[in-house]
Image: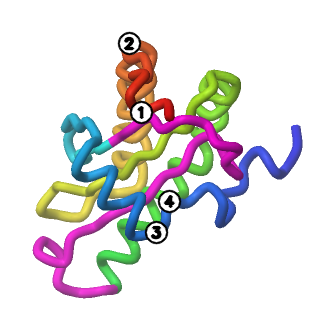
């Protein structure tokens, strides 16, 4: 088992205003408390990584930056530990998966609860992606 498998490197994080605006305007979403997931499939134009994720904790619900950062760290850690099966499943499909984990709860959850919910959320996301095919209009 290699250590790379459990890393969460820069190339795996979703960044860039263009990608975010496209994701929120054209992407699909679902809620699974305490997360709201917005996701999208894009044609695989030789990306650095087949799956890219972003983690969002709203300032509206958590005024203190320390609380937002703690929740974001918990989300990233749970994703880092449980992403390997998800990434392996979508590695050779010919498209890239981009998504955001939006923490929608009004109160902070302990790590164990965030981890359990994130596992269930990744399973649901995998089912939704498998039930979707990339449209020819996007595959330019």
Of pointers 4 and 2, the one earlier in the residue sequence: 4
* Labels 4 and 1 touching (C-beta < 8 A): no
Label 4 and label 2: CA atoms lie apart by 23 Å
- Answer with mark 3 or mark 2, whichever residue precedes in sequence: 3
Distance in Å between CA atoms under marks 3 and 2: 27 Å
> Where does the image place residue 67, in percent across and percent down from the top left?
30, 78
- Reading the image, the residue beneath label 1 is 138
CA gap, disc 1 to disc 3?
19 Å
Q: Are marks 4 and 2 in contact (CB under 8 Å)?
A: no
Residue position for label 3: 16
Q: Of the residues under marks 4 and 1, which one precedes in the sequence?
A: 4
Secondary structure type for disc 1: loop
Foreground label between 4 and 1: 1
Residue at the spot x=35%, y=40% of the render? 39
Residue plotted at (31% across, 75% down): 68
Q: Which residue is mark 4?
A: 14
Give the Cα separation between the discs numbered 1 and 2: 17 Å
């Amino acid at each position: 088992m290699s250590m790379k498998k459990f890393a969460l490197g820069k190339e795996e994080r979703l960044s860039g205003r263009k990608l975010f605006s496209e994701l929120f305007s054209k992407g699909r979403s679902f809620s699974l408390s305490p997360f709201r997931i917005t996701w999208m499939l894009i044609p695989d134009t030789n990306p650095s990584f087949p799956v890219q994720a972003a983690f969002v904790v709203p300032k509206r619900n958590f005024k203190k930056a320390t609380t937002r950062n703690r929740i974001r760290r918990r989300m990233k850690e749970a994703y880092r530990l449980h992403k390997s099966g998800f990434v392996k499943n979508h590695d050779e499909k010919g498209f890239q998966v981009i998504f955001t984990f939006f923490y929608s709860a009004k109160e902070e959850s302990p790590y164990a609860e965030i981890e359990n919910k994130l596992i269930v959320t990744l399973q649901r996301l995998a089912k939704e992606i498998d039930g979707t095919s990339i449209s020819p209009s996007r595959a330019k």
